[in-house]
Amino acid sequence: MKNAIALAALALATVPLAAFAQDGGAPYAVAKWKDGKACAISYTFDDGLRDHFTHVLPLLKRHGLRGTFWIIGDAVETGSLKRTPVMDWPQIAEIARWGNEIASHGLHHKATSRCADHAEILAERDLNADLIEKRTGLRPVTFCYPFNDKKDKDGESIVALVEDGLVGSRTFQKAFGGKTKADDFNAYIEREREKGAWVVTMTHGIVRGYDMWENPKELDKHFRWVREQKDIWIAPFRDVCAYAKVRDCVELTFTQDADGNTVATPSTGALDGRIFGGTMLTLLDSEGGKVCDFDPFQGSFTVKR
Ligand SMILES: [Zn+2]
């Protein structure tokens, strides 16, 4: 079963297989997901609500998981959003200390289609990043669109505009809260695993506030299940987003050196090494087994002696 999953992951890999010119065999491929896992999940929590500190952080710690927290700088400064309490800066810093991602949800949570122009959209992005960095020392590298609105006032997509200079932005999500039942959600994840998908969850309130969980114990129950799924890559949004973007751009050329070693040379296309450098991709052999991890911005490497 495990092999079948690994082979499925290999088949789904979008990077072209490169074979030897010399002997025509032994192809290697970049794994679709890190370590050849079958699928990926990023748990993301919107609006920086206080519940995320009091109810989510303890659960993530208990289950050894890490998530992404979309912070609205102005709401942190004023202490609430839609009359729901939000985290303060020390709580956000504490969340970061446990390896979670602190990310940007815009300075005022203003829908991009309500912004006067592109300059205002970028100001919402950049002033929020400046404030988060000033208060926590951490600069966000990913963005979540307020109200999931990804258009400007003329109806044009602003995803490329917003992602410029960042690792990426949340362009799709699966609601995770309200009436969510762990058993139903686990079944959904199993279906997504078959597709080799990346699931990005969206959660607001836990025990109070909007979209709060009807039964917050279901969240704990799901985490208990998911942490046992060894073929699922669970990582913050930033990590999976960077992996997917680098994976889709990198191309590998294989040669043999004078001693008969196989040498892989990655090309990274138009990707900016200042943003994506350090992203470790997993190389698989033709059986779907892991060969090694490599940073494509570090140049050629020996695959096998
Ligand atoms: Zn929001």
Image (tube, helix red, strand yellow):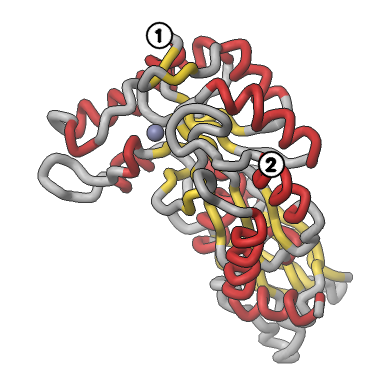
Asked if residue 274 shows in the view, the reply is no
Q: How many marks?
A: 2
Q: Say what secondary structure mark 2 lies in.
A: helix
Q: Is mark 1 within 8 Å of ligand 1?
A: no
Q: Amino acid at mark 2?
A: Lys
Determine the CA span between mark 1 and mark 2. Answer: 30 Å
The spot of residue 45 in percent (x, y) is 53, 36
Q: Is residue 288 left or right of residue 162?
A: right
Residue under pointer 2: 217
Q: Amino acid at mark 1?
A: Thr
Residue at image position (84%, 70%) is 304
The answer to whether residue 243 is above or below residue 46 is below
Q: Quadrant of the N terminus?
A: bottom right
Q: Say what secondary structure mark 1 lies in.
A: helix
The answer to whether residue 131 is above or below residue 165 is above
Residue placed farthest to the left in the image?
Answer: 154
Q: Can you tell which mark lies on residue 78?
A: 1
Dot placed on the residue nearer the N-terminal end, 1 or 2: 1
Q: Can you tell which mark lies on residue 186?
A: none
The spot of residue 126 in percent (x, y) is 36, 24
The spot of residue 67 in percent (x, y) is 63, 38
- Mark 2, Cα crowd under 10 Å, few <14 / some 14-19 / many 20+, is few
- The image quadrant where one finds ligand 1 is top left
Q: Quadrant of residue 58?
A: top right
